[in-house]
Each structure stands twice: as structure tokens, then as C-alpha cells.
Image (cartoon, rainbow, N blue to C red):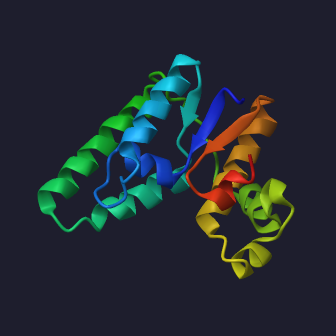
Amino acid sequence: MPQIEFIDTSVLCNIVPVPKFDQDREAIVAEMAEKMERGVEFILPITTVIETGNHIAQVADGTARRTAAQNLESLLRMVIESKAPWTLHEIAWDKGFLERFLAGASSQVSYVDHAQAKVGAGDLCILTERDHYTARSLKDAGIWTLDRGLAAHN
């Protein structure tokens, strides 16, 4: 099992928690504790941060929205400071990234074909970022997700 896991939006929304996107919070928190005990480190892909932030912005209750935003801010500060279990992974949004994205990353299925199959660009960005990390670090990395389609790429 990989010691590095990229966190998908479906998981981060439970960790934060984001109201109406946190139905599995108890199970996710327990699983996170187990993973941390095994020494797993977590990486937040930029796509996950953006999608989670967008879900937070749509929370109807202002107090709950602010609390979720503050929780995400605290978590991001931990990432910035590389506080365990978080690992900072820097990636450039450049020509190479976009070429790998359009080619479908390690899935070997193009972005267009993924879109036709109703696979979101966010999932493909996470795959692209994970592939970049594994190529650069020579470490195996998985994706922690509740999405069966994305999990198939582990």
C-alpha cells in the first residue's frame, strides 16, 4: 500500500467538514487515523483545494460557511508548514502539465474521451498531478477517494 496518498475532494469535504458533503465524516476520520498510524503522508492536489473551496462557498448558512472556510484554512497552513501527516507538493501549471492532462495522464485515455465517458477534468488533473509526483520522487502514490471511477486508477 502506498505511503503517499493524494486526497480527493470526496475525502477532503469529510475531513474539513463541509456541510452536505460530509456524510462519511466518521468513517473518513477513523480511516485517516489508521493511515496516519501506518505512517501514510497526504498530499492535497490543487484541484481538491479548488473544488472543496467551491463547495464551501455554496454553503447556505453563513456561520457554517465561515467555520468550514476557517477549517480549510487551518489545514492548508499545516500543508504549507509540512506538518505531519501533510506533505507539500509543488507543481507548475505549465505546458508539460497541460500536455499530460490532455493525453490522459497514466490512464492512457485522452481528456476528450474521458469527458465523453463523463469523467471530470478535476479527476484527470488529480491523476496528472499524482503521475508527476511519482515520476519526480520515484515513490509510489495512491489516491484516497470515495469515487469508484477515480479509485480504479490506484
Q: Is residue 65 above or below residue 15?
A: below
Residue ranking furthest to the left? 63
Count every numbered label the image shows and give the total: 0
- Residue positioned 28% across, 57% down in the render: 19
Give residue 133's quadrant in the image: top right
- Residue positioned 46% across, 52% down in the render: 49
The answer to whether residue 76 of the structure is visible from this angle is no
Counting from the top left corner in percent of width and height, residue 79 is at: 45, 33
Counting from the top left corner in percent of width and height, residue 60 is at: 20, 68
Counting from the top left corner in percent of width and height, residue 144 is at: 59, 43
Residue closer to the observer: 2 or 91: 2
On the rendered structure, is 73 left or right of 118?
left
**Which part of the image, by quadrant, shows the N terminus?**
top right
Give residue 137's quadrant in the image: top right
Q: Is residue 39 above or below residue 62?
A: above
On the rendered structure, is 20 left or right of 42?
left
The answer to whether residue 11 of the structure is visible from this angle is yes
On the rendered structure, is 104 left or right of 85?
right
- Residue positioned 81% across, 30% down in the render: 138
Residue closer to the observer: 64 or 32: 32
On the rendered structure, is 7 left or right of 152?
left
Counting from the top left corner in percent of width and height, residue 110 is at: 81, 70
Residue closer to the observer: 100 or 110: 110
- Residue positioned 64% across, 53% down in the render: 126
